[in-house]
Amino acid sequence: MTEAQREACLQFAVQRIPEGELFSAFGGDFSQTPNDTIRLLEQARDDRSANDVEFALGLIFRFQPSADYVPLLWELLLADFHTRHEDIALALEDLKDPRSIGALYLAAHAHFAHLDYDENFALPRKCTWALARIGTPEAFDRLRQLVESPNPKISAFAQKRLQTPP
């Protein structure tokens, strides 16, 4: 992304510019071609740009491309160069795509430096919610595995989802 495109994303996010100005910055209409946002997220991943991941995710959440972006989301869920892990877990929860089960399980155990402050373990909690919402036998198997976590909070999150799935 160029600086002008980043600025347009920021201004659009805070509702200071309309969609038309955002589209002008990118030379295309995301409401007509929402999958173009996938390419922005792929470029952010390739460049390992935390800022561009954040901006591209904002565009993806707004313009909702096809499920083609799910593998990219679970790849980014496990990547350590950005800080949007919780947003990605929430997106995967909403999508309920069984392809994300393995990544959600791994992310529940992952350590990301930017989450060191979080004694409530919000990311693992969101991962257990997502697994429960996916609701397949494999997803529930992963929740049962998380019950065995040495971290009592993660174990409790998983146990709760098994007792009261969403």
Image (cartoon, rainbow, N blue to C red):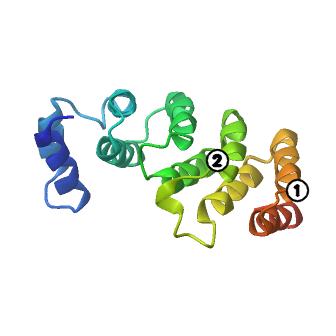
> Is 29 on the left or on the right of 62, as rendered?
left
Q: Position of residue 36 (x, y in %)?
A: 33, 28
**Camera-nearest residue between 31 and 95:** 95
Residue at x-position 19% and y-position 45%: 6
**In this orientation, which residue lies closer to the viewer: 149 or 32?**
149
Identify the element where label 1 is drawn. Answer: loop
Q: Which mark is residue 6?
A: none
Query: In the picture provided, is 127 more to the left or to the right than 11?
Result: right
Amino acid type at mark 1? Glu
Image quarter hosting the N terminus: top left
Q: Position of residue 3 (x, y in %)?
A: 13, 41
Q: Mark 2 falls on what kind of element?
A: helix
| Earlier sequence position, callout 1 versus callout 2 | 2
* Outermost residue toward the bottom in this view: 119
Dot 1 corresponds to which residue? 148
Q: Is residue 56 left or right of residue 7?
A: right
Question: Residue under circle 2?
Answer: 107
